[in-house]
Amino acid sequence: MRSTRVPARPSSRDPRPPDVGPLRTEYRPPSPVDVDRAVGAQRHGRHDPTFTATGPLRSGGVIWRASRTPSGVATLALRRTADGAVHAAAWGPGAGWALNQLPALCGARDEPDDFDATRHPSVAEWHRRFPDLRIGRTDLVFDALVSAIMEQKVTGLQAFSAWRSIVTWYGERAPGPTPRPMFAPPDIEGWRHVPSWAWHRAGLEPPQSRTIVEAARRGASIARATADAADGESRDRVFISLRGVGVWTSAETRIRAFGDPDAVSIGDYHLAHQVGYALTGHRTDDDGMLELLEPFAGHRQRVIRLIYAGAGLEPRRGPRLAPEDHRDR
């Protein structure tokens, strides 16, 4: 009989790190910002071990985010005040880095001033309704790349489950008084040394796990090269140089790590259908999507965010795609 043993968790089984008084800061955006959307876009499903929220910030909730920063693991807690300020507390060796990066996470480096929403009446209406929509960024390249690779050619449920499993088994327990146990992702070497059987037990297919392990061998240089790149095309060239990484994965990574306002995830199972339905009332393919978004060049990801915020989802035409599971039972 095949064993169903849960994989060993080298670091996450350690006791909760001792709670040391947090570092604190206050961020006051120069203009209103929808922090819930800017930060919430980094969440990997409802049960993401790196992210939890006690409710929307606008309603008095708190967003908790665990990450592995260049200075070490950090837990960040965000609370919003009635006047729009964001109060933040951070725990762990990476607390200072996380607080310094907070404005970018909330969308401070997103510059929509030259965005002309009037090129399509629906886009103009959504922009009127959501003028505070901003695209946040994490500046954590490798974690964004790994999560995008996990989402290649599978359902969201499969990808989120694999992320949850590997991060919980091989990540590090997040410091601070988190409302539930949370974990920061492994470091680059940690991703590289996840054993093959653990990927399999998490439900990730061999092409994706091999791509992650091979990317980890060049992880530090990838992070440096893309951080220093001048634009999205330059970052594309770096990411696509990796075997197993294509335009979809590169775009998803650029969006999450760098808040790229123009990135479009070509090849996505749903995106072209959604854009076509929102802008014309009918489905379209990738070529049709790019044609529809061309008038908004430089801000195509912004239009996509507005579509999801304002248009709602296309009505379902059939049963949800069933996840495939090739693991031995």
Image (cartoon, rainbow, N blue to C red):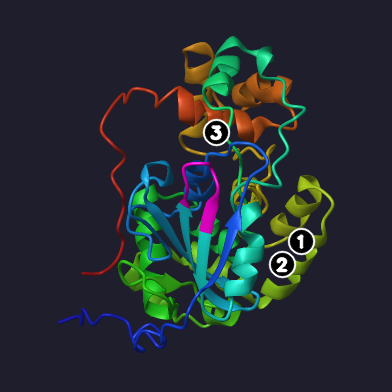
What residue sits 60% from the left and 46% below the top?
A: 248
- Say what amino acid the circle numbered 3 marks: Arg
Q: Which mark is residue 223?
A: 2
Q: Does 251 sit left or right of 88 as displayed?
A: right
Q: Amino acid at mark 1?
A: Ala
Task: Please give the residue where the numbered disc 3 appears in the rendered image.
Answer: 305
Quick one: quadrant of the N terminus?
bottom left
Q: Residue at x 66, y 50 (%)?
A: 254
Q: Is residue 324 above or below residue 117?
A: below
Q: 162 or 38: nearer the eye?
A: 38
- Quadrant for residue 295, please give it: top right
Badge 1: residue crowd in 10 Å (few <14, some 14–19, many ≥20): some
* Magenta-highlighted residues: 80-87
Q: Which residue is mark 1?
A: 227
Would you say 311 lies left or right of 180 here? Answer: right
Circle 3 sits in a helix, a strand or a loop, which is it? helix
Assign the C terminus to one quadrant of the image.
bottom left
Q: Is residue 56 magenta?
A: no
Secondary structure character of the magenta stretch overall: loop
- Give the residue displayed 58% in from the left and 22% down from the top: 127
Q: Is residue 102 visible?
A: yes
**Quadrant of res 219:** bottom right
Q: Position of residue 163 (x, y in %)?
A: 42, 64
Q: Earlier in the sequence, mark 3 or mark 1?
A: 1
> Does residue 253 appear to the left or right of 325 in the view shown?
right
Q: Are marks 2 and 1 in contact (CB under 8 Å)?
A: yes
